[in-house]
Amino acid sequence: MTLLVALTWDPKPWVDRFELHLPEYPVAVLGNEFDRSAVRYVATWGPKPGSLSDLPALEAIFSLGAGVDHLMGYPNLPDVPIVRVSQDDLTHRMSEYVVMHCLLHLRDQRRYDAAQRAKQWDADRTPPIAGDVRVGVMGFGVLGQDAARKLQLMGFDVAGWSRTPKTVQGFEIFSGPEGLEKFLARTDILVSLMPLTPETRGILNASLFAKLARDGQLGGPILINVGRGGLQVESDILAALDRGILKAATLDVFQVEPLPTDSPLWTHPRVTVTPHNSAVSDPDKTARYIAQQIRRHEAGEPFQNIVERSRGY
Ligand code: NDP
Ligand code: OXD
């Protein structure tokens, strides 16, 4: 029995942590020699096409992140459960990022950064407080709900949007295409925390931006996309910024990653770029989580956080 690590990143930290947390399982690395008939589990991110075929004893595939779009397009994906990461370490990292960037926009921190560089004492305004600002969390799942709760603690007026109707105490939740316009119309800061699926691809586009609230306290709507780059149409973001439809954008994910050096997003004065690191999967915490899932399964209990292939997340 073997755990196969199939990664496009440096596998070493992962192998070390799997050996630590799952000492009973020999770890093989894709690219090295290994016995395909012994592989019972795969831990992977962006596996090369063909690399997961012909594993006759395979029982589960673990995505090393919360998102599984890297697997959904994979040709002939073995018909075994796909388990994604959903654990506190990743969730808390994401909420830190979302809260920080909402606060940076609330307090117009970029303006003060520029003023500092120009040695200007820019003291003539009183920014709104969080209670005056409506945040819309698009994708109200594990990450969206945790971020929403923490934003609410800061005082923001938070609502959510999900695919299916749901009730979460303390939040107004809109759902489905029929709920989208109302959700957008009450949103000053749009936080995108959706998975990339055929339904959500390109959803952050000109027509959506035009439906965001225009009567807010921040001087225009703001986009924060931490979901996936494929959700956004980057040319529409740039055009919306230049036409004043969007005031600013914070982007952690991009249509092409790494973001090409000739992308105008890098230097746009109202865009904040981070390198898809709002919530990295920590090798130690993630290997612990996967070890725990394998132990559950081997004790006859179901895996947790299984992906529903038909909906793509
Ligand atoms: P969940 O599956 O818990 O939540 C997904 C949410 O999106 C759900 O509320 C779901 O609706 C909603 N959703 C899905 N499809 C649609 C749709 N068509 N219309 C409206 N809402 C939709 O996922 P997580 O919260 O754990 O993660 C969300 C995403 O965050 C990941 O898929 C990944 O892409 C991204 N991510 C990015 C990271 C980064 O570093 N930038 C790190 C980790 C994750 P419903 O509740 O009805 O199912
Ligand atoms: C994830 C990611 O999906 O890091 O976990 O993007």
Image (spheres, rainbow, N blue to C red):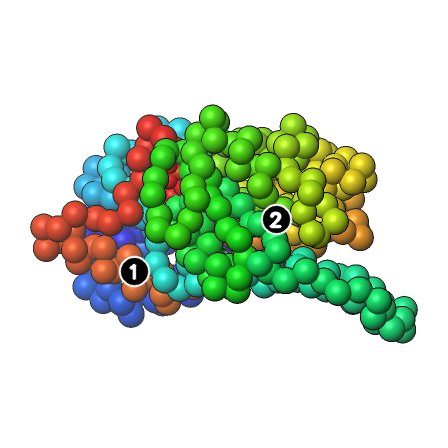
* x and y, in percent, of residue 120 in the image: 89, 71
Mark 2 crowdedness (10 Å alpha carbons): few <14, some 14-19, many ≥20: many
The reply to whether discs 1 and 2 touch (Cβ–Cβ < 8 Å) is no
Q: Does mark 1 have its CB less than 8 Å from ligand 2? A: no
Q: Which residue is drawn at 34% across and 58% down?
A: 87
Apparent side of residue 177 relative to residue 231 in the rendered image (left or right): left
* Label 1 Cα crowd, 10 Å radius (few <14 / some 14-19 / many 20+): some
- Determine the CA span between mark 1 and mark 2: 33 Å
User: Quadrant location of residue 51?
Assistant: top left
Residue found 78% across the figure and 40% down from its top: 244
SS at badge 2: strand
Identify the residue shown where x is 43% and y is 41%: 173
Amino acid type at image mark 2: Ile
Q: Is residue 220 visible?
A: yes
Q: Quadrant of residue 25?
A: bottom left
Ligand 1 lies in quarter: top left
* Disc 1 residue type (three-letter): Tyr
| Residue corresponding to mark 2 | 189
Q: Residue 289 carries which label?
A: 1
At 27% across and 67% down in the image, what residue appears? 21
Q: Earlier in the sequence, mark 1 or mark 2?
A: 2
Tell me how many marks there are.
2
- Where does the C terminus fall, quadrant-wise? top left
Q: Is residue 281 left or right of residue 127?
A: left
Q: Residue 134 location in percent, x, y?
A: 58, 50
